[in-house]
Image (tube, rainbow, N blue to C red):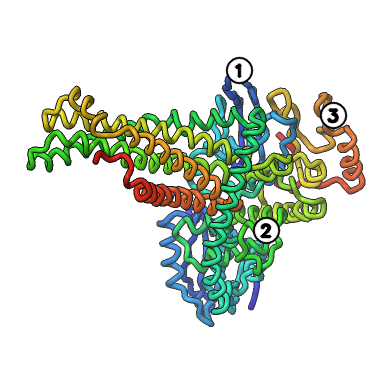
Amino acid sequence: MNDVSNTVVDIRKLWTVFKNADGENVVHRDLDLRIERGEVLSLVGGSGTGKTVLLRQILGLEKPSRGVVEVLGQAPGELSAKGAANVGMLFQHGALFSAFSVLENIAFPLRELKLLPGELVRNAALVKLQMVGLQPRHANMSPADLSGGMIKRVALARALIMDPPLLLLDEPTAGLDPEASDSFCDLLRGLHRELGLTVVMVTHDLDTLFDLSTRIAVLADHKVITSGSAREVITYPHPFIHEYFLGGRGQRALEALHDKPAQAPPASAGASH
Amino acid sequence: MSLATSTADAPAAGSVLPRVEEREQDGRRWTVASGRWTTLAMSSRPSWQALAKDLAGAPPAEDRAWDLRPIEQLDHIGAQLLWEHWRHDWPATLEMSPQHKAVLDQVAQYTVGTPNEPPPTLAERLKHFSHTGPRALEVMRDFVGLIGQLALDACTLARAPHRAPWRDFSGHLYQFGATALHITALVGLLIGVVLAYLISQQLRQYGAEAFVVNILGLSLIRELGPVLAAVLIAGRSGSAITAQIGVMRVTEELDAMRVMGIPHGFRLVMPRVLALAIAMPLISLWTSMAALVGGMFAADAALDISPSYFLSALPRAVPIINLWLALAKSAVFGILIALIGCYFGMKVKPNTESLGRGTTSSVVTSITAVILVDALFAVLFKGVGFRA
């Protein structure tokens, strides 16, 4: 495959400007970011640096003020019309449909195609349900009866139902206890290896960050100031990075990182552009 | 079952769509699958129909051998399709690349008997049914509780007026009252015109044209104005109250408020009830006025009754007590609509379905309550406000 088809997300010269009563609030200024196939890219940045906005722009939920966002070589707006087969999104609070059971939630995008036979859709949803570590007996529960960790798993199964090549995660481990968040990370790592997914995630959880990412992109001063492996990023001289990674919490997470052998990125993922 | 571990042959150009073909080799019939067996490829109608037709031509028979090596890409839905086609059993002879085999293995492992929810037993149905009666009682009890709480809150208000949420109150007054003026005026005006035309048709037959003032004045001021305004406000503000409070339940704002020690009754229910109790009579008066203006012009056009005669005859035809009755009635309607809206809002459970159901119940219940109470007023005050 050539270079072009290896780029899953391509963001060039992106500007995001919010207009409010006090004037204009520039969130992104000339932001460039390229995400290659097979990467697990984490977006890191302080509050208000527009991480979630960037995710929403990749999804086509919001339009940038200026600049180009391309996902799989297309504008995200055209892409989202074709549905969940291209991009899967795990929303921070799951965004499960409360009127449906767990299985109906997972099967929903596939069923809405009105094409595949019902039995196939049902079994496909059951397969995904078990792939994210739940049991068939959970299939008929309603989202209101699920714990936080289970909601995330069901939402992940729903995002993956059509086997999209690109998966976006917004705070995948927020609100989970350490054990649940560890097992969710294991699950994500396993799925990434198994399905050859490209993952873009926004997270504030440093353990998750160092555990999963093959590349970290740091958002500050309205753009991506640096991107690379955890080791490369923390040596970049910038006050935000110093504060974020080398504060008390960052040190503890880094020690854990040094304890285990360096993670080899998947073969297809070039280190960075 | 034999399994070839060679990797897939280089895909021929144009083999992107998922396909199934037949081939004779070594005296056996082989079914060859090729192309991209992915959700994306199958999610367009033509390619899915072509594939379904191909598959129907290759039923899963005992002696059939399957060659899946030319498949370019196989995802879980593609594998699921094959597995369903094989009726959850491996074919006798199967050749495929190990990486695709892994996907199929996973699908085969996880496709289990579909769990079904057991149907409710007779005892459960009976229990469910028997709860309906007590539920009506429960609603009544809760509602009485709400009225009692409102009375207590009113006492608190009278004792310490400076502690009341006056900003909220004025906001609600604007929302429920001022912003409803256009729609109520329009509806009132049109009803007045329609009614006047209808009445004038009948009165002309008896030569009693002058009585149009009496009929219009009495019916609009005493009955139609207040009821019409109340029905409109129930649909407009009753639903808004339920939705507001319901969303606060969904987002746990109600719990946050309780934790802070701020009572829902005093902070949420009372300002809304008070605002509607004041706004409702004013809107009812406004609606009656609009309807009378409409009726006045229609009477002028249909019966040649001049507006100046209409205006001078109106006070003689309709004793002023009718206006006070209408205002009092409207205040009661307003209190009821706000209370019912708050009640169903508080009862919302934290999911979207419950919110929709609560809003519907709120509007239906408050319109019904308005009409019931109006009938009650009609019976109670049947001797008041009519010229003997």
Say which residue appears at 48% left-offset and 49% top-offset.
B362
Say which residue label 3 marks. Answer: A243
Residue A22: assigned label: 1
Where is the C terminus of chain B found, in terms of image quarters? Answer: top left
Extreme residue in the front direction: B388
Query: Which quadrant of the rendered structure holds the N terminus of chain B?
Result: bottom right
User: Which mark is nearer the camera, 3 or 1?
Assistant: 1
Label 3 packing within 10 angstroms: few (<14), some (14-19), many (20+): few
Chain containing mark 2: A
Residue B161 coordinates in the image, percent (x, y): 64, 30
Residue B263 pos. (x, y %): 67, 42
Residue located at (16% from left, 31% from top): B299
Q: CA distance from mark 3 to mark 1?
A: 29 Å
Q: Quadrant of residue B247?
A: top right
Q: Are marks 3 and 2 in contact (CB under 8 Å)?
A: no
Chain under callout 3: A
Place residue B131 in its image quadrant.
Answer: bottom right
- Under circle 3, the secondary element is helix
Judged from the image, the secondary structure of the residue bearing numbered disc 1 is loop
Query: Counting residues from the N terminus, which is met first, the one under dot 3 or under dot 2?
Result: 2
Residue A190 horizontal/vertical position (percent): 73, 56
The residue closer to the viewer here, A27 or B138, is B138
Residue behind mark 2: A146
- On the rendered structure, is B73 left or right of A226? left
- Residue B73 in which image quadrant: bottom right
* Amino acid type, mark 1: Asp
